[in-house]
Image (cartoon, coloured by chain):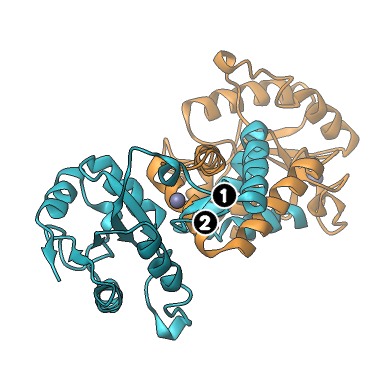
Chain colours: A orange, B cyan
């Protein structure tokens, strides 16, 4: 019923998380019927982000800059490093407001089935960063899921050989929960109650 | 927390219907972290659709062709014309499978507040089409909302002066409901039970 280009637009909208065939059709028609300006802005934003966004040379978060804003901030304590799975987790912890150190973003967790090992998570880089910045404490704030716990365990063993304090964010976070959905107060408490590994 | 290009991507995703700040952030990070291929396809599809999709010269539905597939189909009865609000309504009626005529797509309904009058809905073109195709029956299948009913009434008065049968899709469709969400059987019945205006 739809012309090839409209079909293709509907299909391609389905790459978005949580968007099924019905929402994709609704979105495509909405953009074409009623919001050309928004669609144009979105097409440009996608293209630009795809072309330019890479990873921070220091913490590996997503950014189009060589080094992200947080890593460039001289007021952040480089001796305290919080290790998280995704950029969304950085946002969640920052909004809690209690952590003044820096981050290292794994962009994932260990998942042998998906071919994601220590290399893919940049753990070599993490060791170099810890030594280079003379990090004194690493707080591991991976998700409290099975994969997040396994990743935490692996990283903890590795970092302990560097003779630094390694701690785990406290389990104020509900088990099985994903960090980015936890409210700021709980996160602040969880950071406060971290325990040495 | 996010770099300018990522912020812009998150903002621009909010033009999609049903996408709030949280989903937009999730979508942007998902695309950048995990689905560059999908994001690339989406950026291309959006750009192409924006550049090329216009309106069918005959029925005014959205298409990149001069005349849409349905209007080009010689097996469709040009003497029976179904008038709907949106391309999604065409899809809904086609999936019911009982209508063998052609369509006219208003791409909206009369809405003086939004500056949508008869001209914006292409009603001049509709009259020309009716005369050119020697249409014998026009079935008005605008939504059974207040605006849809008002639009139906206006069109009916206009078409009756052309001396053709004008009918309204039967109200098997629940009042206040939008056509595109009605199941095929109900739509088939509603078409069957149309009443002359
Ligand atoms: Zn950084
Ligand atoms: Zn057409």
- Of all residues shown, which one is farthest toward the bottom? B113
Query: What residue sits 67% from the left and 25% below the top?
Result: A155
For marks 1 and 2, the one nearer the N-term is: 2
Residue designated by label 1: B66
Q: Nearer the viewer, residue B51 or A135?
A: B51
Q: Residues within 10 Å of mark 2 (few under 14, many from 20)?
A: some
Label 1 within 8 A of ligand 2 by Cβ: no
Q: Are marks 1 and 2 in contact (CB under 8 Å)?
A: yes
Residue B84 located left or right of residue B38: left
Q: Secondary structure at mark 2?
A: loop
How far is disc 1 from disc 2 in space, using C-alphas?
A: 6 Å
Chain for mark 2? Answer: B
Q: Is residue B176 left or right of residue A85?
A: left
Q: Same subunit under labels 1 and 2?
A: yes
Residue B32's spot in the image, x, y percent?
A: 67, 40
| In the image, the residue with mark 2 has its CB under 8 Å from the nearest atom of ligand 2 | yes
Tell me the quadrant of ligand 1. top right
Element marked by disc 1: loop
* Residue nearer the viewer, A62 or B179: B179
Q: How packed is label 1: few (under 14 Cα within 10 Å), some, or many (20 or more)?
A: some
Quadrant, the N terminus of chain B: bottom right
Along the horizontal axis of the image, is B156 left or right of B110? left
Kindly identify the residue that appears in the image at 51 percent across and 37 percent down: A11
């Amino acid at each position: 019923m739809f012309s090839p280009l409209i079909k293709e637009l509907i299909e391609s909208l389905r790459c978005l998380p949580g968007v099924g065939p019905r929402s994709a059709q609704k979105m495509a028609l909405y953009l074409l019927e009623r919001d050309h300006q928004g669609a144009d802005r979105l097409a440009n934003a996608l293209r630009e982000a795809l072309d330019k966004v890479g990873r921070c040379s220091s913490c590996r978060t997503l950014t189009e800059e060589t080094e992200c804003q947080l890593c460039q901030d001289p007021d952040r304590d480089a001796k305290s490093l919080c290790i998280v799975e995704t950029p969304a987790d950085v946002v969640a912890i920052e909004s809690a407001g209690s952590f003044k150190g820096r981050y290292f973003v794994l962009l994932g967790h260990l998942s042998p089935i998906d071919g994601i090992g220590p290399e893919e998570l940049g753990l070599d880089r993490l060791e170099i960063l810890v030594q280079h910045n003379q990090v004194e404490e690493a707080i591991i704030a991976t998700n409290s899921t099975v994969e997040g716990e396994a990743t935490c365990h692996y990283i903890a063993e590795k970092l302990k050989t560097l003779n630094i304090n390694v701690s785990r964010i406290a389990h104020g976070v509900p088990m099985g929960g994903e960090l980015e959905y936890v409210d700021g107060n709980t996160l602040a408490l969880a950071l406060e109650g971290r325990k040495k590994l």
